[in-house]
Image: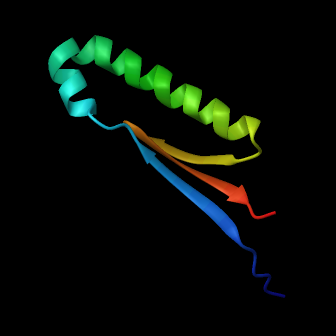
Amino acid sequence: MTQIRQRTVLFADLRGSTALFETLGNAEATSVVTHTISQMGLAVDRVGGHLVKTLGDGLMAVFEAI
């Protein structure tokens, strides 16, 4: 039987990441972006969300409707 559930979907992308790469260079900018996306993923988990996917300087997460 089909169930319909409401969800909240979060798409997040780091603003200015291209400029960050131009300023810091690939290695340093990659480290900063990776760390930031990782911290965002942990925050999603802490509030009960589910990290669906990360891609470069962004992520997608899903939260159950309460």
Observer-nearest of 10 and 25: 10
Q: Residue placed at 75% from the left, 81% from the top?
A: 4
Q: Quadrant of residue 46?
A: top right
Please provide percent x and percent y for residue 54: 48, 41
**Above or below 21: residue 18:** below
Q: Give left or right: position of 37 versus 8.
A: left
Q: Residue furthest left?
A: 22
Q: Quadrant of residue 19?
A: top left
Please provide percent x and percent y for residue 39: 57, 26
Q: Residue furthest bottom?
A: 1
Observer-nearest of 54 and 17: 17
Q: Give left or right: position of 23 versus 45.
A: left
Q: Give left or right: position of 32 versus 65.
A: left
Q: Is residue 56 visible?
A: no
Q: Residue placed at 75% from the left, 75% from the top?
A: 5
**Above or below 53: residue 32:** above
What colour-coding does the image apply?
Answer: rainbow
Q: Residue placed at 66% from the left, 40% from the top?
A: 44
Please provide percent x and percent y for residue 62: 64, 55
Q: Give left or right: position of 13 versus 39.
A: left
Assign the N terminus to one quadrant of the image: bottom right
Assign the C terminus to one quadrant of the image: bottom right
Please provide percent x and percent y for residue 32: 39, 18
Q: Is residue 49 visible?
A: yes
Q: Residue placed at 71% from the left, 73% from the top?
A: 6
Observer-nearest of 11 and 26: 11
Number of numbered discs overlaid on the protein picture: 0
**Above or below 18: residue 35:** above
